[in-house]
């Protein structure tokens, strides 16, 4: 059934792209795809008819659904039949179709990028980050093979297209010679074409008195500079998303001022470092959508910036890392010891992080003692422990791979659980039924 559905959706998607000829912007990377997609959409929406992938629809079913403007129909065969019939009708008879598609291309195995490119060959390709230990590396022979798969995105760009690459990620930046398209880089590095400067998290007070105004920074391209504010949004990775979106805007002839105005409407998607009030005047940094080594380290950097009485990390296993599993979790444990006052670990792999957090190191390195840590096999138990230890003024980072269901921790302690459906990931019926 699934294979037949994939074939039908792919055929309709290819036919739609051939007939409608939209301008295609595709985003790939090991982290930051959805935030970058949302930032691009915010920049382009005032100027073009734009469609973006919903949630994180970035696979062999999700990408065709975005192209066709369809909703996922779950396991209802009759609903799928009706939705497919509607998409076929729109293909031939609908008068309007978006000028621009903003798509996420996610890969899990060899050949995935070829399939997605075959659905919609991009005019602009963005590679956000890959890192030394990419997510899904378990399904590839090594990290280099995964890198080559992701960089296929920019190899197929037309000469009049644009490859937008993260200058600060050496694994990404080294792919500059893989494309015939114009290359635009972004990042904090001095050599970036779109450079991020003067980054600042604006916050004051602690506990009930804490006031947060999001992040502020400047974007510079040559002699052009613009100030950007992202309200209720936190972390340098969000500045990267904005810079990538700015590169897209400039490729489509928007001014820096128009780009900055569009970014005022940007808001981080659920599960991507959303700041949520918790019980007892504490705060949650909810980053529960997924986890990779690079995104977890970035999230811990954000936690370190926060004005808090105590900093707590509730971290679930990072999955699909293959032979890098122990090393990656130990790297996280080392950073946890530097940043956190209390650590709640969830899952067998996070035991490596706990062990590393207690190891002696260089003289100036912090380390934790066993009394500052707790381990649990599941997120429900971790949530109850967090509820027990939470104090006024605490800042809590909650993060883990999708399979660890760490959003349940946030739901356990959030001050307004009635808002969970709007603020948290995986809140629809199918997900709520899963254990």
Image: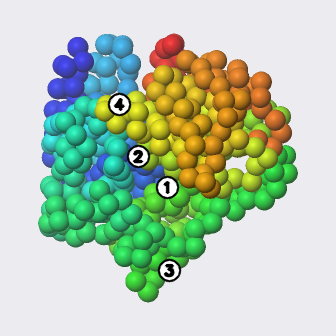
The Cα atoms of the two marked residues, 2 and 1, are separated by 9 Å
The Cα atoms of the two marked residues, 1 and 4, are separated by 22 Å
Labels 2 and 1 touching (C-beta < 8 A): yes
Where residue 365 appears, x then y in whole percent? 60, 51
Q: Earlier in the sequence, mark 1 or mark 3?
A: 3
Q: Residue at x 22, y 40 (%)?
A: 142
Closest to the observer, 164 or 160? 164
The answer to whether 338 appears left or right of 68 in the picture is right
Q: Nearer the viewer, mark 1 or mark 3?
A: 1
Q: Which residue is mark 4?
A: 320
Is 378 above or below relative to 280? Answer: above
User: Under tag 4, what secondary structure?
Assistant: loop
Where residue 184 appears, x then y in whole percent? 30, 69
Q: Which residue is mark 2?
A: 31
Q: Residue at x 64, y 48 (%)?
A: 366
Q: Specify the quadrant of the image occupied by residue 166.
A: bottom left
Q: How is the image coloured?
A: rainbow
Q: Specify the quadrant of the image occupied by residue 409.
A: top right
The Cα atoms of the two marked residues, 2 and 3, are separated by 27 Å
Q: Which mark is residue 237?
A: 1
Q: Which residue is mark 3?
A: 225
Closest to the observer, 17 or 322? 322
The Cα atoms of the two marked residues, 4 and 3, are separated by 40 Å
């Amino acid at each position: 059934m699934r294979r037949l559905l994939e074939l039908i959706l792919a055929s309709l998607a290819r036919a739609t792209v051939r007939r409608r000829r939209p301008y295609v912007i595709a985003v790939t990377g090991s982290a930051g795809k959805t935030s970058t997609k949302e930032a691009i959409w915010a920049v382009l929406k005032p100027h073009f008819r734009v469609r973006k992938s919903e949630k994180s629809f970035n696979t062999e079913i999700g990408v065709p659904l975005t192209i066709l403007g369809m909703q996922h129909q779950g396991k209802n065969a009759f609903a799928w039949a009706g939705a497919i019939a509607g998409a076929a009708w729109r293909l031939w008879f609908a008068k309007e179709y978006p000028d621009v598609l903003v798509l996420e291309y996610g890969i899990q195995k060899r050949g995935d990028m070829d399939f997605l490119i075959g659905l919609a060959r991009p005019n602009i390709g963005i590679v956000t980050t890959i890192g030394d230990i990419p997510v899904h590396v378990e399904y590839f022979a090594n990290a280099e093979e995964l890198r080559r798969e992701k960089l296929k995105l920019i190899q197929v760009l037309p000469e009049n297209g644009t490859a937008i690459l993260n200058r600060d990620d050496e694994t990404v930046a080294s792919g500059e010679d893989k494309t015939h398209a114009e290359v635009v880089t972004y990042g904090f590095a001095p050599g970036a074409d779109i450079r991020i400067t003067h980054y600042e998290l604006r916050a004051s007070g602690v506990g009930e008195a804490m006031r947060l105004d999001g992040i502020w920074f400047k974007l510079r391209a040559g002699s052009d500079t613009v100030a950007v504010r992202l309200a209720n949004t936190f972390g340098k990775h969000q500045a990267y998303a904005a810079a990538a979106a700015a590169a897209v805007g400039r490729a489509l002839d928007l001014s820096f001022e128009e780009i900055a105005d569009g970014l005022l409407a940007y808001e981080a998607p659920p599960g991507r470092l959303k700041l949520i009030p918790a019980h007892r005047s504490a705060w949650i940094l909810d980053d529960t959508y997924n986890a990779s080594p690079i995104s977890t380290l970035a999230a811990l950097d954000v936690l370190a910036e926060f004005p808090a009485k105590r900093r707590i990390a509730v971290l679930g296993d990072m999955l699909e890392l293959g032979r890098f599993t122990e090393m990656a979790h130990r790297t996280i444990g080392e950073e946890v010891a530097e940043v956190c006052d209390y650590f709640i670990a969830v899952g067998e792999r996070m035991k490596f992080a706990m062990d590393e957090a207690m190891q002696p190191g260089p003289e100036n390195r912090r380390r934790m003692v066993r009394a500052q840590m707790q381990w649990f096999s599941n997120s429900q138990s971790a949530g109850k422990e967090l509820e027990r230890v939470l104090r006024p003024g605490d800042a809590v980072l909650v993060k883990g791979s999708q399979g660890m269901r760490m959003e349940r921790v946030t739901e356990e302690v959030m001050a307004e659980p009635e808002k969970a459906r709007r603020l948290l990931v995986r809140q629809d019926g199918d997900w709520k039924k899963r254990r």
